[in-house]
Amino acid sequence: MPIRTEKATVVAEDGRRLLSEVSCTFGSGELTLLVGANGAGKSTLLDVLSGLTACEGTVELDGVPIRDGRRLNREAAYRIGRQFQYPELQLFAATVQKEFDYSLGYMKLPDDENRTRTDRAMSEMGLADSLKAESPLVLSGGEKRRVAIATTLAADPDWLLLDEPTAGLDPEAASRLVSALLSRKGRPSGGIIAATHDLDLLLPAADRVVVLREGGVIADMPASELALRPDVWDRASIGRPASAELAGQLRLLGLPVPAKFLAPEEAADLIAGRLRAAGRRPFLETDAYGEAPGEGVATQPGAALERDREPGPDRDRGSGRIAGSPKRFVESLDPRAKWLFMMTFSIGVLIQRDWTGFGLGAITAAALLLLCRVPARHIVPLMRPFLWFAAASVAVSGLGIGEAGPAASSSGGAWEPGAGGSATEAPIRFGVFTFSAAAAGVTSFELLKIGCVMVAGILLSATTTPFEMKRAIEYVLLPLRYIRFPVEAVALTGSLLLRFIPVLRREAVKFNRIARSRGKRVRRSGATRLRDLPAMIVPLLMSLLQMATDLTVSMEARGYTRTGQRRTSAVQLVMSRRDWAVVAAAAVVAATLAAVAIG
């Protein structure tokens, strides 16, 4: 019952390809390793295989798609156990036992079976039985990680998808985990897929290795073949494992090293045998990997290595930002010029009194959208709460009871009869309820102006880094430094607010995925059920508090508590001609919108 991917592709919000046409088959009974440099796409591929991330292409478990459109296949979700990076962050329950109860809840097991699975998983990870009554939040870092891994093992899924499973574990705990994985090898109905940088520990146990680089697969082969392919490690830019280097040196000494990655014990046995037979074995004129001079590694049989591909525009991690594009032009502008344009545009839109002026502002906002080229998937999630609020406000503002609906005259002149309605038009009756289109129109007009300003603010934050914004605020507030105003602290606060919003969203998405993976709650929208909110909210709050603590320490270490001191910066803001051109454009837009509003 293998897992197969066919041209699986994942594109990030900024247009970068996180995965690029990945086609692999993960066989049952095998331990498959995903290896590659940081950012190669290992975690993203695990998310795709577990159905937590949608992708282009196909992903099938035993011939059945893991996702049915936007919805995760429930049967596939029950057969897959996903362990994330830093699994200790997912803990939330009052006791360790309740952590296991939550992870096993979807199986609806009898109490005795639940306890049996819990005891077995804790024993595998070397956890004392007395820890069941302890709060997981007061355990040591290593104990937290072992508890989190044990909750995944307790469910005994057909497929284990592990992300850096041995990171943060002491040697004994890591050895226990490897033993637990080895005991699960050979099953006919599932397998193990692990993304790891701990190559020397896991390679000797691996059956197959998939090597990733920049979102694409550059090698997919049995571990025995990869042991004779040193060029793969060089091309993946991750360095050769120590076990591979040692095997090469042993071959230079004439030892008959098998085509595999040696465990430390196996290497020690070979070296001991060589020492016992010293002087009786001839030196073989071969290279470090057992090949005669002149033989190329490309002739190895069965190698499933692809030709070296230069990263093209669609594979370049910066492909979302093409030099010379309009978006690149906007990003390169001085943040002060962009901020001034946004402020004047916002004021010009908010002072409009009729639909003509708003239409001019909306056209300007649409032009900015085309110029900045910020993907809709980046804007819509930020605007969705406001749109729901606006729809509810329009409905409520027009609703009335009795003979007269909401007073249209309360708009203060914002509604013009000639612009689409009359302040005196009769409300629509629905029994005892009435609905005034005029009053609803007034509300929608005001909210649309606010929405237009929000779009401009989103575009500013999407095309300006927090560091650039911080430098711009410092330059604007620079004169206040002479009265010992904490310019640096205020600027840092402003930039952190801009940075905190995407960080909060990213952390919320991460813990939402973890909660859905653990609880096996399948919803088409991907939203978290109310019963799963504690599994998401508690870890999210703990993560944010830890971030705040780390930030406080770093700010104090850098002297941000001391005010009135001049600081050096690697970036100096200088207004160029195109920046002044943007300032001039801001003046023209402001004057035009003001003239329309006054006229």
Image (cartoon, rainbow, N blue to C red):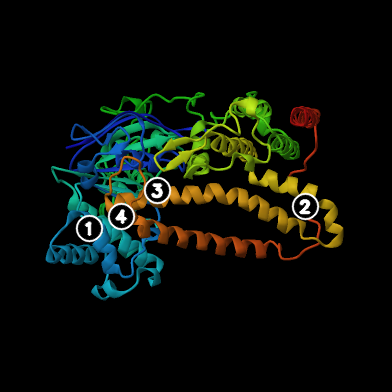
- In percent of width and height, residue 213 lies at 43, 35
Amino acid tagged 2: Thr
* Residue at the spot of label 1: 105
Q: Neighbour class for label 1 at 10 Å: few (<14), some, many (≥20)? A: some
Pointer 4 or 2: first along the chain = 4
Alpha carbons under labels 3 and 4: distance apart = 17 Å
Pointer 2 or 1: first along the chain = 1
Up/down of 572 relative to 11, above or below: below
The reply to whether dot 3 and dot 1 touch (C-beta < 8 Å) is no
The residue at the point 37 percent across, 71 percent down is 139
Amino acid tagged 1: Gly
- In percent of width and height, residue 510 lies at 42, 49
* Residue at the spot of label 4: 264
Up/down of 60 relative to 119, above or below: above
Quadrant location of the N terminus in the rendered image:
top left
Q: Neighbour class for label 2 at 10 Å: few (<14), some, many (≥20)? A: few
- In percent of width and height, residue 249 lies at 37, 45
Pointer 3 or 4: first along the chain = 3
Labels 4, 2: front one: 2
Pointer 3 or 2: first along the chain = 3
**Residue 490 location, quadrant:** bottom right
The reply to whether dot 2 and dot 1 touch (C-beta < 8 Å) is no
* Residue at the spot of label 2: 568
The residue at the point 67 percent across, 52 percent down is 494
Alpha carbons under labels 4 and 2: distance apart = 51 Å
- In percent of width and height, residue 558 lies at 68, 61
Q: Which residue is at the front of the view, 453 or 434? A: 434
* Residue at the spot of label 3: 197
Amino acid tagged 4: Pro
Res 119 seen here: yes
